[in-house]
Image (tube, coloured by chain):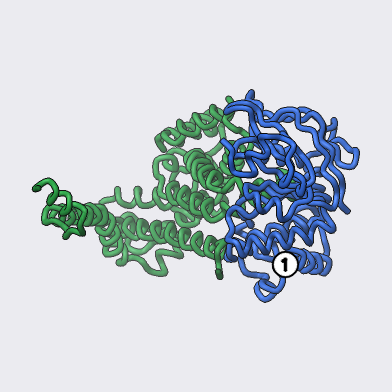
Amino acid sequence: MTLQQEAVRSTAIQRISTGRRIKDHLVRGLVYLAFALAVVPLVSVLWLVISNGMARFDLEFLTHSMRGIGARDAGGGAYHAIIGTLEQVLLASLISVPIGLFTAIYLVEYGSGGRLSRAISFFVDVMTGVPSVVAGLFVLAFWILVLGMPYSGWAGAMALSVLMMPTVVRSAEEMLRLVPNDLREASYALGVPKWRTIVKVVLPTAFTGIVTGVMLAIARVAGETAPLLLTVFFTDSINNNPFSGPQMGLPLYVFDQAGRPNDTAIDRAWTGALTLILIVMLLNLAARLIAWWRAPAKGR
Amino acid sequence: MSKQIQVSGLDAYYGSHKAIEDVSMTIEPRSITAFIGPSGCGKSTFLRTLNRMHEVIPGARVEGKVLLDGEDLYGPGVEPVSVRRQIGMVFQRPNPFPTMSIYENVAAGLRLNGRVSKSELDGIVEESLKGANLWNEVKDRLSKPGAGLSGGQQQRLCIARAIAVRPQVLLMDEPCSALDPISTLAIEDLMAKLKNDYTIVIVTHNMQQAARVSDRTAFFNLAAQGQPGKVVEMDETSRMFTNPSNKATEDYITGRFG
């Protein structure tokens, strides 16, 4: 009898038990807590950089170099470092994006799990784990010490490109793998050769994701200090030519200024950090705009 | 502009696995030929060997002869890409290119294969969409993405895309299996119309559909799981469905199979 009642009760529509309600609230609370914990450092870093960096975030900072600024002087700026960072990152992207993209295309479209593609995958993984200082040392040892080339923005760009390449390969590879095989087959069935299928169908479909991946890679290397330290040297002057002579970079600028004892220099370091964050954010914004503009499902 | 296909002694492999064995048949121009048979018996594989799409899969290969009006598609030096321009294909799931508009989808085959003037392209796109019975539904939104259409419309868009390159033969791999009955009817009507100009081959799991649309039917079957598929019987559709000569065919089409 009781068994029967039990059976009837368990099949009827039930209220949510108190135990489950408590569990639900508990887990929900934990999830919110985890989110808050993750956001706290992010927000506090932003807050600290903005509040300390706003003091010197003026036109002079953005348009002047440190040339002729004495150790205790106020004023001066990071124009030379901004130019250096932009040029170095651009050059690094010019090296690593084509190579990374072609590598990813090979891995996804042509390699098909062969020995070569497995070897490439392995070395890309190894490269992902290379500490940035090692990339700098590599260029220092090879380019500057062995080949006898001078310190330059180009040397820095090469070091940065070593760091960028694996990120670009990995993200582009993932995005290309997401492109449904149906689309490739549809294109082949129209009598389109494989290379044209890749250029006209596969790449445009994966375009948004690839741009995002490239931007993340750029954001990563834009803040690298160690490889620049060993390859571009220091300068307080504006050097627009990345191929000749020492250049500056924003991370280096921050490192340099923060190491000086004066408040004016510390202020400049904060503002340099703020500028770096703004540049990366602007680049990300630009990538979003490009992605939105090329989005496949626009105007559905 | 349709051509005859003659297949003789064709085997298809996936790696070391033999998927179909010793298929020989003649597919007549300006007619619809249907392939029926249980899942996994090699119908789709065979269909894909007809325009050399089979070998796109890594490790897949083909032995035997496929003659398109006497020309061997697997002859030495034959460019697979040129074969596929002659023999178009429509897939089971509608697969319009997501980055392209309706217009660009239809124009894709021509645009990706070389230069065509804008005015010529406009004409071909309109003609192909009309040919696929889709023109009236999309003529006001040709610049909208193809992925925004309904499933049945997308499939007709894919048919329009396939016929825009003016193939000799149109292969259809279960073109209606993802569609509702109304869209299926639209596509069947379309096939009846297209058969005036093209050689059409269709794979279907729907026996009524094979009976409704096709002129000739081939029944594929495999002896046992893991064995290669073979053509059991091929005949006029009317005879096949009323008076099949083979016991297995009769069992399959009357639903007594397995």
Q: Position of residue B253 (x, y in %)?
A: 65, 44
Q: Nearer the viewer, residue B118 or B109?
A: B109
Q: Position of residue B211 (x, y in %)?
A: 71, 52
Rendered colour, chain A = green
The reply, left or right, for residue A211 in relation to residue B219 is left
Q: Residues within 10 Å of mark 1 (few under 14, many from 20)?
A: many
Rendered colour, chain B = blue
Q: Residue furthest front?
A: B243
Q: Nearer the viewer, residue A82 or B134?
A: B134
Q: Residue furthest bottom?
A: B140
Q: Position of residue B146 (x, y in %)?
A: 62, 63
The reply, left or right, for residue B86 in relation to residue A210 is right
Q: Residue furthest top?
A: B16
Give the residue type at disc 1. Answer: Asn
Tag 1, which chain? Answer: B
Q: Is residue A232 positioned above or below B105 on the image?
A: above
Question: Residue at the location (56% across, 41% down)?
Answer: A100
Residue carrying label 1: B133
Q: Nearer the viewer, residue B93 or A200?
A: B93
Question: Residue at the location (63% across, 55% down)?
Answer: B176
Regarding residue A156, the answer to whether it shows in the image is no
